[in-house]
Amino acid sequence: MEHILSASVFSKFSKAFFEQGRWKMYLEGLGNTIIIAVVAALIGTVIGVTFAMVNYLNKKTGKLKVFSRIANVYITIIRGTPVVLQLMILYFVVFASWDNGIMIGAITFGLNSGAYVAEIARAGFESVDDGQMEAGRSLGMSTAQTMWHIVIPQAVKNCLPPLFNEFITLVKETAIVGYVGIMDLGKIPGLIQSRTFDYLFPLVIAAVMYLAVVLVLTKILHVLEKKMAKSDRNGGAVNGK
Amino acid sequence: MENNKPLIEVKNLVKSFGDNVVLDNISTNIHHGEKVVVIGPSGSGKSTFLRCLNCLEDPTDGEIIFENENIADPKVDINIHRQNMGMVFQQFNLFNNKTVLENIMLAPVIIYTKKAVAEGKTKEQFKKECYDKAMELLRRIGLEDKANVYPSTLSGGQKQRIAIVRALAMNPKVMLFDEPTSALDPEMVGEVLDLIKELADEGMTMVIVTHEMGFAREVATRVLFMADGNIAEEGTPTQIFDNPQNPRTVQFLKAVL
Ligand SMILES: Nc1ncnc2c1ncn2[C@@H]1O[C@H](COP(=O)(O)OP(=O)(O)OP(=O)(O)O)[C@@H](O)[C@H]1O
Ligand SMILES: [Mg+2]
């Protein structure tokens, strides 16, 4: 009895993973998931940090009111609508004639993530002491020079852990791209089920792969946090007031 | 020399924050080599006055003439003038993401490299010059062994002395100090005041806001007593400390001495 059961478990697993080189499909899907997450994180970071910077400069100098307003409208719209609709708008409308689904997925999540990163980065900029900008300006450096050499590095450093966390979230949440047929890891179980007529094993295998990636990234995040705490003690301090 | 012409002319300076008039029509001249000490009760506008001198606060009205330009005019490129006015803050404000050496070298390198290259130096040569100058400044304050550490590992006194030489690295014509020792533990006040006195003895023009009355008496060539956004009384240290005329000055000195 036991023997038969384990035999059938193994054969189902084998069908879901080894037969006809199906494992390659998971790996390809995983590769696409990671590409989408990495590109989206890069786009999101650029957008988010830029918005937060505009906001910071507007507060300090009162000179970027219009940009700051635009940024806030963007953030409100992105955060106030479902990402799956944003995906459909980009996939079926804006980029209807572009067949690179992976990149469309990455851009969608990049634009989406930017609105969330903006909040993270805003906190990063707010944590930089006002005296840092004043000191740079009092030496005769321009606002831009002081931002670039002093304020931005400290702001970004202050929000590295939450930024990395946002990346981990992206790895999981981008599974939505399967909705419009983009071949990420989340889409693979459905494909395999349509051939083997077993859903359980492909789903478990994909879930285990997501989990493995997330656990590895979480571990990296913890190492990063520890390192930063240490460099704060040793002098890389960001808030050494 | 142009010694008869003031280094900084303050004419009818007004600064208000909303309805709050913090500086109410202040006029005074700061001459080459003068050490002007500004004293007065909390909230009287001392910091605001000092910060208006290099336009860290934009004056609401009036003129600040420095090197033949009215730097209170928003059209003037303030950065160029700030390069000639060093400022030292109560909270030191060393750059947290830079080592001590980088703190001192950063502004000279990024501001003057272009000019040095135009004069025929290579970037590397100029950077080396800035490095040598920074190390010389660190040796002067006995902190050359701290060149490569980050500010958070330093004591308050060390931070403030580094902040002072960071300003000196730009070769300023005047130094502005806003309560440079107020954030220090008592045992570190001396080392910072000694350095400021040294600079004073070398002839640096200075404007110093301080609550250290002994130091004010010792270093000042002129004392300004501020009250309610005005210069209520000014004179030599002897006049102000030993023979104050204005009842506000008398009252203030009684409270702090
Ligand atoms: N950025 C600002 N916005 C609004 N009000 C301000 C600002 N800076 C200063 N003030 C106000 O201006 C007045 C004078 O402040 P200032 O800091 O110049 O006084 P101070 O003489 O330096 O006092 P202290 O001895 O406490 O340092 C205070 O009433 C203060 O509340
Ligand atoms: Mg003050």
Image (cartoon, rainbow, N blue to C red):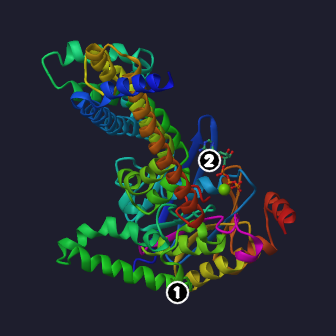
> x, y percentage for residue A58?
44, 37
Q: Pointers 2 and 1 in contact (CB under 8 A)?
A: no
Question: Marks 2 and 1, how far apart in space?
Answer: 41 Å
* Tag 1: amino acid: Arg
Q: Secondary structure at mark 1?
A: helix
Q: Nearer the viewer, mark 2 or mark 1?
A: 1
Give me the residue at 48% from left, 69% from top. Answer: B99
Q: How many marks?
A: 2
> x, y percentage for residue A18?
28, 31
Specify the quadrant that holds the C terminus of chain A. Answer: bottom right
Above or below — where is B57 with respect to B183?
above
Mark 1 falls within which chain?
B
> x, y percentage for residue B15?
57, 45
Say if the magenta span includes residue A56: no
- Give whichever of A110, B228 is nearer the camera: A110
> x, y percentage for residue B231?
66, 57
Say whether residue B239 is left or right of residue A142. Answer: right
Question: Residue A17, located in which quarter of the rendered image?
Answer: top left
Say if the magenta span includes residue B188: yes
Mark 2 falls within which chain?
B
User: Magenta residues?
Assistant: B170-189
Which residue bears the numbered disc 1? B140
